[in-house]
Image (cartoon, rainbow, N blue to C red):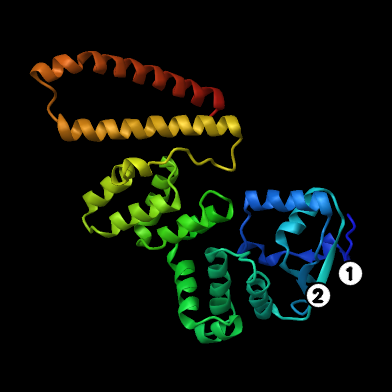
Amino acid sequence: MSTTTSTEPRDEVALAQIDQRFATLRLVEPDELSRIRGSIERMGILSPVLVATAIEDTRLVLVDGFKRVRIVTDRGDVTIWVRRIAVDAAAAKVAMIAANAGHRGLCDVEEAWIVRSLCREHKLTQADVGKALRRDKSWVCRRLMLAERLEEVLQDDIRIGLLSSTVARELARLPRGNQVAMAASIRAHGLTSRHAHRIVTELLRTSDPAARAEVLANPLRYLGAAELPSTRTTDPRLGKRANEVRESLLSVGNASERCTRTVSRCAPTGLVGDDARILSSLVERTLRSATEVAAVIGQLVKDSGMP
């Protein structure tokens, strides 16, 4: 373990003693993890992680320092510096928020998960939670609604990095029946949380199923030219090359869906006269490209052993 210049007595414990049962209440953020890793490599561990000692007699339950524990575990360390607090599970979750209050270490979704746990698992009232966290009841209510309105499958996507917490906040404004489809559309088009706010607002303006389907299928039409995303998002589970394949597949799929909808709407019985003559060469080229793409994707499926 790297040394530091701190004069605080070091309470070193084996990493194997650290119980991370509350890890599901925190997010793994690659950029922040990388920043902390770099800091640890340069200067070592400058502050202890926080552990609760009164949840189980024989366990040290991690309250704060999840990224530090992950980093030192990855690099092969066997001990870590801890600070102990004698609190039960509910008080430990309150401490998770308190320990990060000064530097915004928790995002809205993480706070929402902790508030939901306090209310549902520990049976605290919203007033009790607000008093413990020194927050007003409206803050507690907003966090609880965020955790309980958002589809669980999307909360799982947030945990593994497929969906940002800021986008999740926008999705929670929608009825549950539209959230998963909206999330898929956001990922497919590489939209940011600002874009998501615009599209979600558009969805909420209409109750017509056909109009909502159109928004989900082609959200870019509701953004101004200056707002269009310039970069694609990546899937953190994939490597660089696989993400390039993913982006190409998304582009082809989106273009195919747009073409299908446009032809069905604008030429349901075919083109005639000059329209057919002018577009014939483009149609021929598109058919040729579509045939080539279908062959390439078919070979990809075969070579990859996909069902």
Q: Position of residue 91 (x, y in %)?
A: 67, 80
Marks 2/1 in contact by CB < 8 Å: the verdict is yes
Considering every residue shown, the one lying at the far left of the view is 273
Placement of 132 over or under 238, stated as above or below: below
Q: Residue at x 68, y 77 (%)?
A: 89
Disc 1, SS: loop
Q: Amino acid at mark 2?
A: Arg
Q: Is residue 60 left or right of residue 187?
A: right
Q: Residue at x 48, y 82 (%)?
A: 137
Placement of 210 over or under 149, stated as above or below: above
Placement of 120 over or under 218, stated as above or below: below
Q: Residue at x 29, y 46 (%)?
A: 222
Q: Position of residue 167 (x, y in %)?
A: 46, 55
Q: Which residue is mark 2?
A: 84
Q: Position of residue 79 (x, y in %)?
A: 87, 59
Q: Which residue is mark 1?
A: 11
CA neighbours of label 2 inside 10 A, class few (<14), some (14 to 19), many (20+): some
Q: Amino acid at mark 1?
A: Asp
The answer to which image quadrant residue 275 occupies is: top left
**Label 2 – label 1 distance at C-alpha:** 9 Å
Q: Residue at x 55, y 74 (%)?
A: 115
CA neighbours of label 1 inside 10 A, class few (<14), some (14 to 19), many (20+): few
The disc label shown at residue 254, or none: none
Q: Position of residue 272 (x, y in %)?
A: 9, 20
